[in-house]
Image (cartoon, rainbow, N blue to C red):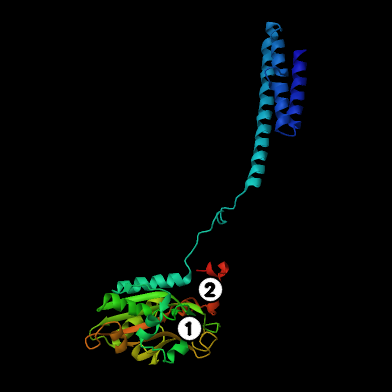
């Protein structure tokens, strides 16, 4: 009689456990069949009432039924746990190749990168890095640089004037004057910074741009010294020899004056809007410091001389990275700036 009951109990237990549709239903079936007050526990109580000769056989049947039902329960429980884990992973899946959430790390503007590279180069060559005001006096921006009020070079620079006779500096050359006044000779200095001109904006001109001014004052300085530093500069920035040409120029604060041009790296010299179809880009106006500039700064030109140069940082960045329009550099478009 108990054997039949155990067989039926086993079949019912298997059916309940196998048909459970979720973990909660499986737990209910376990409590009903395998719990402390479940069907198997009650069958065990009935086992104690059997005669001694029947207990052994019935006990084996009861243990076999219990082992079978417990194995089914453990298997179904593992199935539901795996399904729950898979669902959680699917909901919480994270692509580790994607950028991390939160603020993205910033980067230096290409102008800043080039400026820092040049500062590192020239400090390694013994030059000091100096700075000056962007709103300048007329004396430092023009007169002390051998550009008196009646000089036509003032018209060439199309200046921005502000109240009180001050001017937004049109070049970084005023810093040379301030450095000579403050430190005197011998002097090796560079002055990177922002300058302002009333330019007609196009692919290679902006009203606000960046320059790097350099000067060396010592005894017996020649054009050969100037060319050495200019070629060292260009080779450092471009990582290779570049094609240059030196031609006569005119700048009131140097004599003789030169234009050091670089073959356009945008078009390779074939002609484009950046080089105005000429194949060359004006990059390094330079020359030996005019004696008048030395005198205005309190230096005796009979004892001291030197060279000076002005480098267009913005144009140098364009050549370095192949940028075909100067307006990209001040546009603030992160899609453009993130490339650097």
Residue pointed to by mark 2: 330
**Residue at the outermost bottom position:** 248
75 in relation to 317, above or below: above
Between disc 1 and disc 2, the foreground one is 1
- List x then y, in percent, for residue 334: 56, 67
Quick check: 232 left or right of 262? left
Horizontally, is 14 left or right of 181 in the view?
Answer: right
SS at mark 1?
loop
Q: Position of residue 291 (x, y in %)?
A: 29, 89
Q: Nearer the viewer, residue 77 or 178?
A: 178
Which residue is found at the position 46% from the left and 72% from the top?
Answer: 111
Q: Which residue is mark 1?
A: 159
Rendered image: mark on residue 327: none
Sequence-first disc among 1 and 2:
1
| Contact (Cβ within 8 Å) of mark 1 with mark 2 | no
In the rendered image, residue 2, in percent from the top left (x then y), is placed at 75, 13
User: Relative to residue 146, is residue 95 drawn left or right?
Assistant: right
Between residues 188 and 229, which one lies in front from this camera angle?
188
Pick the front one: 53 or 153: 153
Secondary structure found at label 2:
helix
Residue 224 visible in the snapshot: yes
Corner quadrant of residue 238: bottom left
Instruction: Name which quarter of the figure residue 186 lies in.
Output: bottom left
Q: CA distance from mark 1 to mark 2?
A: 20 Å
Q: Residue at 54% across / 56% down in the picture?
A: 103
Kindly identify the residue that appears in the image at 72 percent across and 34 percent down.
22
């Amino acid at each position: 009689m108990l054997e039949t009951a155990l067989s039926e109990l086993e079949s019912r237990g298997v059916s309940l456990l196998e048909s459970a549709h979720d973990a909660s239903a499986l737990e209910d079936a376990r409590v009903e069949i395998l719990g402390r007050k479940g069907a198997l526990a009650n069958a065990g109580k009935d086992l104690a009432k059997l005669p001694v000769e029947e207990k052994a056989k019935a006990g084996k049947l009861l243990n076999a039924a219990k082992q079978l039902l417990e194995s089914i329960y453990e298997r179904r429980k593992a199935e539901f746990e795996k399904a729950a884990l898979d669902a959680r992973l699917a909901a919480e899946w994270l692509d580790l190749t994607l950028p991390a959430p939160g603020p993205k790390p910033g980067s230096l503007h290409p102008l800043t990168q080039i400026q820092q590279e040049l500062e590192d180069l020239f400090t390694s060559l013994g030059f000091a890095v100096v700075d000056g005001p962007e709103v300048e006096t007329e004396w430092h921006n023009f007169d002390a640089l051998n550009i008196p009020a009646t000089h036509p070079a003032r018209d060439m620079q199309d200046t921005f004037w502000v109240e009180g006779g001050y001017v937004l500096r049109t070049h970084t050359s005023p810093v040379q004057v301030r450095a000579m006044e403050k430190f005197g000779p011998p002097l090796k200095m560079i002055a990177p910074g922002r300058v302002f001109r009333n330019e007609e904006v196009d692919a290679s001109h902006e009203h606000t741009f960046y320059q790097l001014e350099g000067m060396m004052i010592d005894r017996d300085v020649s054009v050969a010294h100037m060319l050495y530093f200019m070629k060292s500069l260009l080779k450092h920035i471009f990582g290779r020899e570049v094609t240059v040409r030196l031609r006569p120029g005119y700048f009131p604060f140097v004599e003789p004056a030169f234009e050091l041009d670089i073959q356009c790296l945008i078009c390779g010299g074939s002609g484009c809007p950046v080089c105005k179809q000429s194949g060359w880009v004006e990059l390094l106006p330079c020359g030996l410091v005019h004696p008048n500039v030395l005198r205005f700064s309190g230096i005796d030109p009979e004892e001291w001389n030197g060279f000076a140069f002005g480098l267009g940082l913005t144009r140098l960045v364009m050549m370095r990275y192949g940028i075909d329009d100067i307006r990209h550099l001040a546009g603030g478009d992160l899609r453009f700036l993130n490339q650097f």
